[in-house]
Image (cartoon, rainbow, N blue to C red):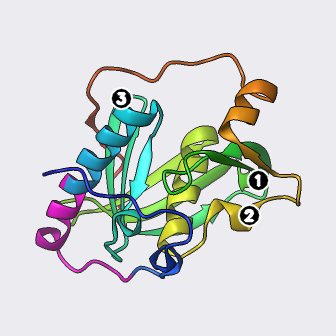
Amino acid sequence: MPARRILQLGDPMLRTVSTPAAAPSEVLPVFEDLRATLHEFRRTHGFGRGISAIQIGVPKRCIYIEFQGLAYCLTNPVYEHQSAERFRLWDDCFSFPNLLVYLERSRAVRVRYQDETGAERRLEAEGPLAELLQHEIDHLDGILAIDRALDENSLCTREEWERRYRPAATPEPSSPPRRAVPSAAD
């Protein structure tokens, strides 16, 4: 499937609360488009780990993530747990790629979801993967990273962030992702 246009900050559809997806046949083409769009964005912008369906104009509760060599297709994700322990980070987004937002997220989460076949799954995550899941689930609820900014000084252009805050570069894996095999639901 071809890469799709990513909705940009200011498009009112980004504020839409996504509806549950009903069947695997409904989500498989969406996941193909999300994967192609993520890869094209990464090729043109040099970063990217996840994307939600609403960002390509599909208001369904679907998220596609590539993280540490694994690919995750999450349909209808729901939090089962969000830790009280939190951490702060500079967050970026495909929908405003030249803006970063300093915000706070839970350090660990557990999410229940269906995979692309409709099987019920659970995913426990800490640190960067937990943050990514929270970012993408926020999109499904019409919440943008800018809504979570800590204060009026928590916005930064990418150029200024590169100059002031960028940590030592960590290259993203160049090999294609493997299929994630999280634990099956009880």
Mark 2 element type: helix
> Which residue matches tag 2?
148
Queried whether the magenta region covers residue 27, the answer comes back as yes
Q: Report the amino acid beneath label 1.
A: Leu
Q: CA distance from mark 2 to mark 3?
A: 28 Å
Q: Nearer the viewer, residue 155 or 61?
A: 155
Give the extent of the magenta segment: 19-32
> Which residue matches tag 3?
69
Q: Are marks 1 and 2 in contact (CB under 8 Å)?
A: yes
Q: CA distance from mark 1 to mark 2?
A: 6 Å
The residue under the point 16% across, 68% down is 24
Q: Nearer the viewer, residue 107 or 61?
A: 61
Where residue 36 sits: x, y (%)? 24, 46
Q: CA distance from mark 1 to mark 3?
A: 26 Å
> Which residue matches tag 1?
103
Badge number at residue 33 = none
Mark 3 element type: loop
Q: Nearer the viewer, residue 164 or 90?
A: 164
State how many labels appear: 3
